[in-house]
Image (cartoon, helix red, strand yellow):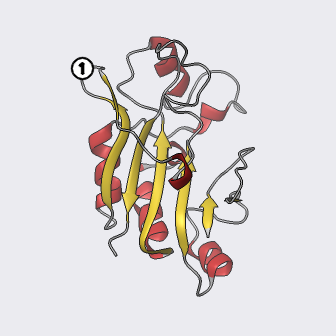
Amino acid sequence: MRILIGAGSQNYPGWIATQKEELDLLSPASFENYFRERRASHFVCEHVWEHLTESEGKAAAVLCFNYLAAGGVMTVAVPDGNFPNEAYQNMVKIGGPGPADHPAADHKIVYKLPLLIHVFESAGFLVDPLEYCDDDGRFHFHDWNWHEGPIYRSFRTDERNKNLQLGFISLIITARKPA
């Protein structure tokens, strides 16, 4: 089972798109009801974790770890707190701009790589960074397998990144459950 958690309008062949009503990252009961004895081979969460506090994010990471098969992969993308673009940072900041129904209005955290790694390692995952900006704002990209974790808001697929110019990126990690 390849599961998109908090998929919104995303839908990829071979992946099951879920919404909060089906799989709530803060509700162990929703995972138990959805999976029962089954386990996912892959999870993808694109721009979901920033809507949780750090402690909620840690609890959600544990929940996903528990429902991921041994050797399974979780790909997570969040706004990057080190991306050196003032308009981007204003858009993704805690509370976000604009009216209450704006997607960033309920952002509770803006991640930088070390904190996102910590959240998932504390749940037992082995973490590899895929795309991120370092503390000096330099962008780093490690080639990754789209079929293992499709992330639209990435350097390679987001149409706002044209001619090798970064318009919109994500901090992206792969978190693997040990076999």
Q: How many marks?
A: 1
Q: 59 or 43, which lies in front? A: 43
Q: 154 or 77, which lies in front? A: 154
Q: In which quarter of the image is the N terminus?
A: bottom right
Q: Quadrant of the C terminus?
A: bottom left
Mark 1, residue position: 136
Q: Residue 55: x, y in percent?
A: 39, 56
Amino acid carrying mark 1 in the image: Asp
Q: In which quarter of the image is residue 9?
A: top right
Residue 123 in the image: above or below residue 31: above
Residue drawn at (51%, 75%) of the image: 67
SS category of the residue bearing label 1: loop
Residue drawn at (51%, 12%) of the image: 163
Residue drawn at (55%, 52%) of the image: 147
Q: Residue 132: x, y in percent?
A: 36, 33
Q: Residue 13: x, y in percent?
A: 71, 54
Q: Residue 124: x, y in percent?
A: 31, 68
Residue 104 in the image: above or below residue 29: above
Q: Is residue 32 left or right of residue 174?
A: right
* Residue, far bottom: 37
Q: Quadrant of residue 31?
A: bottom right
Q: 144 or 75, which lies in front? A: 144
Q: In this view, does 33 lie to the left or right of 133?
A: right
Q: Residues within 10 Å of mark 1 (few under 14, many from 20)?
A: few
Residue 93 in the image: above or below residue 130: above
Q: 150 or 116, which lies in front? A: 150
Q: In this view, does 17 lie to the left or right of 126?
A: right
